[in-house]
Image (cartoon, rainbow, N blue to C red):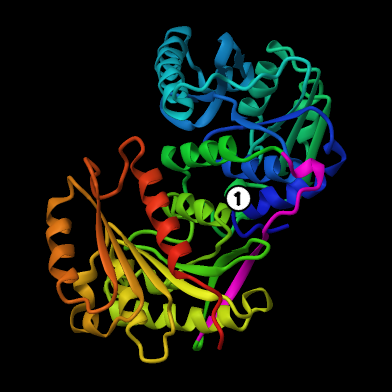
Amino acid sequence: MFFMDRPEAGRQLGARLQHLMGKDVVVLGLPRGGVPVALEVAEALGAPMDVCLVRKLGVPYQPELGMGALGEDGVRVINDVVMREARVTPGELAQVEEREREVLARRARRYRGDRPPARVEGRTVVVVDDGVATGSTARAACRIARARGAAHIVLAVPVAPRDWTARLSGEADELICLDTPRDFFAIGQFYADFSQVDDEEVVACLERAARRPHAAAAGAAGPRDREVEITAGPTRLRGRLTVPEDADGIVLFAHGSGSSRHSPRNRFVAEGLNRAGLGTLLFDLLTEDEERDRANVFDTGLLAGRLTGATGWVRAQPEAEGLAIGYFGASTGAAAALWAAAEPEASVAAVVSRGGRPDLAGPRLPAVTAATLLIVGGADLTVLDLNRQAQARLRCENRLAVVPGATHLFEEPGALEAVTDLARDWFTDHMAPAHV
């Protein structure tokens, strides 16, 4: 079995776990890679989600080789076989443990902030990772859940070696895996996209889970949400289309340089728009081969052409019939959004730029007819000045909104929430169903 990425694996795993619907379930994701998988499982089960903090204890001279793991509440798992074969001394083990305990404490503060750990006592706990290799971290996670009073533990992963049940027997009450291939060398070989998950994405997943009402089990109607392949001329691009019931419009996201459809910031904003009844399309503007040429990343005309092609594709989808179209551009993607909106046949209702470079759209700016909102951080002085210059060239309805104290990436507390609120209000004010 081959997975496109972790979210897709999570959706398949969630479908496999439907027998848990209606039970008192909490989902615990193993940071970092297991968290995007766990988020999809939690959404499928209508369950709350938290992280289960575990740190692998790597052999000092070969850190990718796990000799054990540490978890919260003092849980400690040591693989005596690896310790013996790697000839690790007790002193070396103690040094690795001290370092990893510091990381555990730091990550707990980073991931949860002021939120307490999820309550697991007396509940069914689903421990989720993106796969099992040696099983040390999964074993530690199950023991953490057991120590906290879990009534029933399910260890669920998309892929694992064939002998994984023998390795982990007795640690969980249920072991669920979608695939146990014969030729297993590494978890990443079963994913098309196994890019590293950073702390920012973990935090974004947890915040998304915290905001979501746990009502899926009650049968509440949700948005139509699917992975898609977009045809933009001869090029095929991957994306995710989400359209709530009775949506008033669909917003296409144009990400900045060095980013992709997986951008946690864009996903954060997209979820805010979805809650407001707007559809979203997050997609890659370039293929993997094209991204290797850095010139393509900054080719505004090329990126705008891809956005125009994606717009045509969206309008041909059944769920988009009669809906207005908007663009949300971040960084250099904002220039592509404005360039595309200036096309004579664009018929775009609204454009929002986050920390954008509208100046890169150059002479196209006076031709933009879509209502345009430029959002800039108050501490992002260079970009703020470029936005003011670009705004002076716009002839459409427009506004420059400054988020006080925010830097270019809007990483400050509350900054991205402010961006989301501004974008939501702008799009809902300017996107009425289109008649084409």
Q: Amino acid at mark 1?
A: Arg
Closer to the camera in the image, 394 or 190:
394
Q: Whole-percent x and y of residue 160?
A: 71, 42
Q: Quadrant of the N terminus?
A: bottom right
Residue at x 43% of width, y 76% of height: 349
In the depicted view, which residue is nearer to us: 297 or 432? 432
Query: Which class describes the residues within 10 Å of circle 1: few (<14), some (14-19), or many (20+)?
Result: many
Q: Is residue 281 left or right of residue 187?
A: left
Q: Nearer the viewer, residue 89 or 292?
A: 292
Q: Secondary structure at mark 1?
A: helix
Looking at the image, the residue that sits furthest to the bottom is 344
Task: Confirm whether residue 266 shows in the render.
Answer: yes
Q: Is residue 22 above or below residue 392?
A: above
Which one is in front, 374 or 340? 374
- Measured as percent of width and height from the top left, residue 386 is found at 14, 64
Residue 436, horizontal then vertical, whole percent = 56, 88
Above or below, 31 against 88 in this view is: below
Above or below — where is 364 with respect to 122?
Answer: below
Residue linked to disc 1: 6
Report the number of discs.
1
- What are the residue bounds of the magenta stretch? 215-232
At horizontal 47% and vertical 36% (from top left) the residue drawn is 203
Q: Could you tell whether 61 is left or right of 227 in the image?
A: left
Q: Quadrant of residue 335?
A: bottom left
Residue 126 shown left or right of residue 248 in the figure: right
Residue 151 in the magenta stretch? The answer is no
Q: Is residue 160 visible?
A: no
Tell me residue 94's x, y (percent). Answer: 44, 9
Is 230 included in the stretch rendered in magenta?
A: yes
Q: Residue at x 62, y 42 (%)?
A: 39
